[in-house]
Image: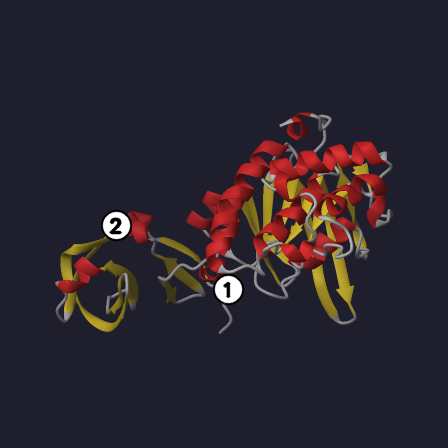
Amino acid sequence: MVLAMTRPASPHPALQTHALSKAFGAVQALREVALTVEAGETLALLGPSGCGKSTALRCVAGLERPDTGRVEIAGRDVTALPPEARGVGLVFQDYALFPHLSVLGNVAYGPQRRGASRAEAGARAREALELVGLGALAERSPDQLSGGQQQRVALARALATRSPLLLLDEPLSNLDEKLRAELRTELRRLFAALGAGVLLVTHDQREALALADQVAVMRAGAVVQQGAAPEVFARPATAWIAAFLGWPNIVAQPGGTALLIPETAAQLGVGEAYPLLARQPDEAGETVTLGHPLGPLTFRLSAREALSLGGTLRLGLDLEQVRQVPDDREP
């Protein structure tokens, strides 16, 4: 697609933030947040509600002014600039489409606001709509579209600006799970084709792992772990991060530490037999908790594996895969 080829190359990262801090009264929303998003890379800001991830995005977009720190987009210091002067494409979770404009008019709005002629803005809009698979719906109004189609129009509107940086704030949160799964695949393909940097805010671990090259986990306004997405999910730095990422087996130890036991360390059906403490069946199988010398451990079994269960479960552990980390969970 031409859209992916016409973005000018830059020697600078798409985004760099330097020690961003922001307080709302007594609440410290951001604590010296430093982020880098390279051109063509997607970084997910991941964390629970209230951790500061949306505030960080709003500071990058210019919708909030940081108390301290600096924002650079494609090497340009934009900290003091208003949103419209920053050269970013922004997609909110509510899509914010103009009901009085057609799909084409919505997508052409951004380029026109940035100085493109009507003809050029229309050409960019049609190009962006083709990229998201909605070229045939250009003349429809937003209220004639499904939720997934509206989400793609909002994305096309951001793409049409040809910005070096796209900002997406919980873009799939208003969709049902089936549609979210479908759009994750589409968005990953689009991000790979664009060449722009993407900063994605999400509380959904699956979304971050599916869409992002890099992940920054936030807690209480600070980035507590950042790195390649597979590495962060496979090697959480602390017990709190592991729990947030969905690790089922985190065993508290004396001295403020915890053991992280990955699923790959467990060999079910071999080794010593341990008593079953709880069983929770579902359509796909069963979740079981067994008593182990390290502490209660939880595992998923397939329906076939669950059929042979008695009152115990044989389990071998590869202790070389078990890691000790600081236990920073709330007591």
Tell me what residue is drawn at x 48 percent, y 49 percent.
Answer: 182
Left or right: where 56 falls relative to 48: right
Q: Type of residue at label 2?
A: Asp
Q: Nearer the viewer, residue 321 or 221?
A: 221
Residue 47, quarter of picture: bottom right
Which of the numbered marks, if any, corresponds to residue 318? 2
Q: Which is more N-terminal, label 2 or label 1?
A: 2
Residue 88 at x, y percent in the picture? 75, 43
**What crowding class fits label 2: few (fewer than 14 Cα within 10 Å), some (14-19), or many (20 or more)?**
few
Q: Nearer the viewer, residue 286 or 270?
A: 286
Tell me what residue is drawn at x 80 percent, y 39 percent.
Answer: 111
Tell me what residue is drawn at x 47 percent, y 51 percent.
Answer: 181
Q: Nearer the viewer, residue 112 or 24?
A: 112
Residue 226 at x, y percent in the picture? 56, 47
**What crowding class fits label 1: few (fewer than 14 Cα within 10 Å), some (14-19), or many (20 or more)?**
few
Q: Secondary structure at mark 2?
A: loop
The residue at which mark 1 appears reads as 328
Q: Type of residue at label 1?
A: Asp
Q: Nearer the viewer, residue 27 or 101?
A: 101
Tell me what residue is drawn at x 30 percent, y 64 percent.
Answer: 298
> In the picture shown, does residue 242 fall above or below 87?
below
Which corner quadrant holds the N terminus? Answer: top right
> In the picture shown, does residue 186 fall above or below 127?
below
Tell me how far mark 1 sits from mark 2, CA to CA: 25 Å
